[in-house]
């Protein structure tokens, strides 16, 4: 009887919630590479070297084995003729919330913010939904890998680098704990309607947040020192604290902190903080980064510029201040990576952010590096992806032209040698209504 009741409850739930599976995309992840593949006859863009006309790229078991021209393809290798097409390393999105949010207006689909202000133990990859509809839409535009970042509070948690294909978050994770995300306290001491009390309140809130950050890192450093002292006379065993445990790679300089800051005073404050605590820093956002470019270049701090296709930071800034930001940083000797993620599901537009930067002064080859090799290096996966070189993952795209141009189409994609389905909900809807109108024209259905 109990089994019967349980079955009825399950059936009732299925009837009551018919849309529960609607959030899952229909694309099937690619199977592991079964045979060596050679892409023959295309224009190969290694990014780390010169362009190769009529080139060949061979990969086996998910790893590139040969890149070059006039390559003799061995017997038993599956040949794919890509004559007239271009072979590029896949594009890399450096700032996103892919897999962590689906529809911002629906709270149940938002999983990038934890309660509290100090959450260094949060790991973004464990919350990723591999069936997100946003993932196939993003990769259909040539983006093969994305960093997904938690948000909220002062210390949001650890970013993860995801391959945009896989059955589970474990399958998708290329690198976990790619950087500790810090939202730098806003330093806007303006008063509302001239009210001095509002100015002081803003200043007080900023100082409180800065003190909280200082205290968190000081406690984490004390925790690490206590652990390192184990075995020495008089040492005591510290009580395990998952927050401080998760910060050990950052304190030892093994992983960077990703600091989100925009204004010049915020950037300077963050740099001083990282210097004081011996932290490797990556700046993202950085609307005012060109104003402190000398400092960033001297400290060897890379900048992830996001977004390029955006409004100026201030009303009196030039209209193209965002568009020219990468070029100005490049001229100052600062490594600049371009990201397109704005938190609204527009990661697919990444190549157009880079294209706009190229149109406004950034050398074209640097714009491509900003979404491939330089991005991979900043994310700590430059030995795996970002360029077409023997020994690296066969994570690449075949296109009809320059991927930074809006008229270019992505014809094929491989992630670690797996063939990736480039369809998505948008292409399915296109095909559906194309069929509808063709039937209308043929008189099969009526308007």
Image (cartoon, rainbow, N blue to C red):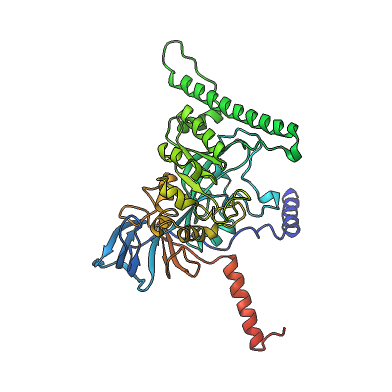
Q: Residue at x 64, y 32 (%)?
A: 206
276 above or below 387? above
Number of on-image labels: 0
375 above or below 182? below
Q: Residue at x 40, y 57 (%)?
A: 363
Query: At which x and y percent is residue 88?
Result: 39, 62
288 above or below 72? above
Determine whether, in the image, residue 216 is placed left or right of residue 297: right
- Residue 178 seen in the figure: no
Dividing the picture into quadrants, the one containing residue 36 is bottom left
Which one is nearer the viewer's eye here, 433 or 23? 433
Query: At which x and y percent is residue 66?
Result: 28, 59
Query: At which x and y percent is residue 250?
Result: 47, 33
Determine whether, in the image, residue 424 is placed left or right of residue 9: left
Q: Quadrant of the C terminus?
A: bottom right
Query: At which x and y percent is residue 342?
Result: 59, 52
Q: Residue at x 42, y 35 (%)?
A: 254
Determine whether, in the image, residue 272 is placed left or right of residue 442: left
Dividing the picture into quadrants, the one containing residue 296 is top left
Q: Of all residues shown, which one is farthest toward the bottom?
A: 443
- Residue 425 seen in the figure: yes
Which one is nearer the viewer's eye here, 176 or 264? 264
């Amino acid at each position: 009887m109990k089994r019967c009741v349980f079955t009825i409850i399950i059936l009732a739930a299925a009837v009551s919630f018919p849309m529960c599976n609607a959030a899952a995309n229909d694309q099937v992840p690619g199977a592991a590479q079964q045979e060596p593949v050679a892409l023959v006859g295309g224009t190969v863009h290694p990014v780390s070297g010169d362009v190769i006309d009529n080139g060949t790229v061979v990969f086996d078991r998910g790893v590139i084995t040969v890149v070059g021209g006039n390559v003799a393809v061995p017997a038993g290798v599956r040949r794919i003729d890509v004559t007239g097409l271009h072979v590029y390393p896949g594009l890399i999105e450096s700032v996103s919330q892919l897999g962590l949010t689906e529809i911002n207006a629906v709270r149940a689909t938002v999983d990038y913010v934890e309660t509290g202000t100090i959450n260094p133990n949060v790991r973004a990859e464990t919350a990723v939904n591999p069936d997100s509809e946003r993932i196939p839409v993003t990769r259909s535009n040539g983006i093969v890998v994305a960093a997904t970042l938690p948000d909220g509070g002062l210390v949001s948690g650890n970013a993860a680098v995801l391959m945009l294909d896989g059955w589970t978050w474990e399958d998708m994770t290329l690198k976990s704990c790619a950087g500790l995300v810090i939202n730098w306290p806003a330093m806007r001491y303006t008063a509302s309607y001239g009210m001095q009390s509002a100015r002081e309140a803003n200043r007080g809130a900023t100082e409180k947040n800065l003190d909280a950050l200082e205290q968190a890192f000081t406690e984490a450093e004390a925790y690490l020192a206590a652990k390192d002292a184990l075995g020495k006379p008089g040492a005591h065993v510290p009580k395990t604290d998952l927050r401080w445990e998760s910060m050990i790679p950052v304190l030892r300089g093994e992983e960077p902190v990703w600091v989100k800051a925009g204004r010049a005073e915020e950037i300077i404050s963050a740099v001083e903080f990282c210097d004081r605590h011996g932290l490797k820093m990556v700046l993202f956002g950085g609307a005012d980064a060109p104003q402190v470019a000398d400092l960033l270049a001297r400290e060897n701090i890379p900048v992830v510029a996001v977004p390029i296709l955006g409004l100026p930071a201030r009303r009196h800034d030039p209209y193209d201040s965002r568009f020219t930001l990468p070029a100005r940083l490049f001229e100052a000797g600062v490594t600049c990576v371009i990201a397109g993620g704005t938190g609204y599901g527009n990661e697919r537009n990444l190549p157009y952010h880079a294209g706009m930067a190229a149109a406004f002064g950034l050398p074209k080859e640097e714009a491509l590096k900003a979404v491939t090799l330089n991005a991979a290096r900043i994310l700590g996966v430059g030995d795996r992806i970002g360029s077409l070189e023997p020994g690296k993952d066969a994570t690449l795209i075949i296109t009809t032209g320059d991927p930074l141009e809006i008229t270019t189409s992505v014809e094929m994609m491989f992630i670690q040698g797996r063939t990736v389905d480039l369809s998505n909900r948008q292409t399915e809807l296109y095909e559906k209504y194309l069929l509808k109108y063709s039937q209308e024209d043929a008189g099969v259905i009526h308007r």
